[in-house]
Image (spheres, grey):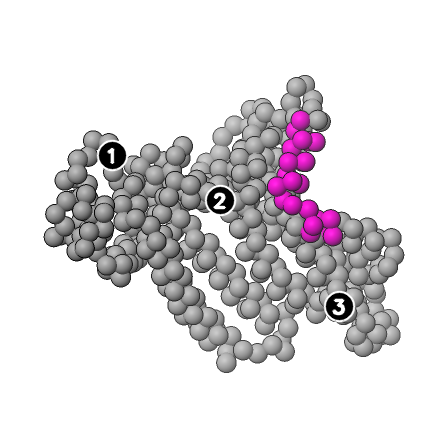
Amino acid sequence: MKLYEYAIRRLLLMVVVLFLLSLVIFYLTRGLLPPTTSLAPYITPKMNDISKLELAQSLGVATPSCPSFTAFSNSQAGCVVPLWGQYLGWLKNVITGNWGYSLLPGISGGTQTTWSVFFDRFPLTAELAVAGAGLTVLIGIPLGIISATHNNKLPDHISRVVSLGGYSVPQYWFGAVLQIVLVLYIRFNGLGLFPANGAFATSCAICIADPGTASLYTGAPLFDGILSVNPAYTWDAFVALALPALTLAITSIGALTRIVRSSMVDALKQDYILLARSKGLRERVVVYRHALRNALLPAVTIAGLLAALLLGGAIVIEIVFTWPGVGSASLIAANSLDINFLELYVLVTALIIVATNLIVDLLYAKLDPRIRY
């Protein structure tokens, strides 16, 4: 099977997976909750029972023959549309981009669509996840290489302690420690070294007080500052991102370091490495061109899994650092039973995870020509 044929096959499978997941999500959010739950974002205090019943009927939850809203609320026989009928109406709306309205306390007042609320905050979560993934690769792979090339020596011991500590420490605890040390203890002119919270801050010791503005290209402050060619704005966005990104990445750095070290140690023992050295190749060429390329396959596998963990772990980090992304909003949605937001959040997260797994599988063929699909 050719690579593009495999990619098409996986894309079709991705659609099936998302469809089945949508069934599960819909059943958990609509089938196990009272039928009135889906009406919460649309009901106002001024609405009477007749208006509420008309609303339920227009949303495809109540049947046209239902006599009253009270009968619908009590799930009287013949008043509630069967779950499969509700799902078909919901799926039709989802395909056309209609996710309904969102009612998140402190975020939306019921007049904003779920789509707009979600994607106003999603760039901030994406920025945090990308930064965490970048730190994981930039720190984890070099630490693993250093550890493997200095096996059982001091650099190896230091790298292993760092990776084991990072893998073991709870993220929320590490984030709290960073805030205590770098925000509360280390202070200059009454300001903490780093900002305590938020996605953009100008009130810290190393922040620029008046960075100017940036055009809203992506909704992510760091990328908007770069695209707007505003170094001061970019710096303040970077400073605000530093502690949350490091906290998010700390666990995955430890995991990736251990995987790379183990793979590199095995690769450096292979016969082709001995042959390369016997040819007089420089050690740098032997390590990075021959050993690392073969050792990266397990690392790519774990990187795909870590990408999903980073996205899911962003919820905890967003809460610790008051980061205004979709992770913290999803917790509010769960507490307030905003099922429209939860459905969109879970499906988008699932889409990112399955897409990441597809990219990882395609990278296999690029890194190792021997792999065929």
Would you identify the image quadrant in which residue 190 lies? top right
Between marks 3 and 1, how big is the CA–CA gap? 65 Å
Please state the horizontal and vertical placement of residue 108, each as a whole percent of the image. Answer: 36, 36
Q: Residue 291: which disc?
A: 3
**Mark 2 Cα-neighbour bin, 10 Å: few <14, some 14–19, many ≥20:** many
| Mark nearer the N terminus (3 vs 1) | 1
Give me the residue at 26% from left, 40% from top: 42
Discs 3/1, front: 1
Q: Is residue 104 above or below residue 276?
A: above
Label 2 SS: helix
Give me the residue at 72% from left, 61% from top: 260
Q: Is residue 188 above or below residue 194?
A: above
Between marks 1 and 2, how big is the CA–CA gap? 27 Å
Please state the horizontal and vertical placement of residue 238, each as a whole percent of the image. Answer: 60, 37
Would you identify the image quadrant in which residue 69 lies? top left
Please state the horizontal and vertical placement of residue 310, each as a whole percent of the image. Answer: 57, 51
Between marks 2 and 3, how big is the CA–CA gap? 39 Å
Which region is colored magenta?
Answer: 163-184
| Mark nearer the N terminus (2 vs 3) | 3
Check residue 174 for magenta coloring: yes
Mark 2, residue position: 327
Mark 1, residue position: 44
Please state the horizontal and vertical placement of residue 99, each as a whole percent of the image. Answer: 32, 49
Dots 2 and 3: beta carbons under 8 Å?
no
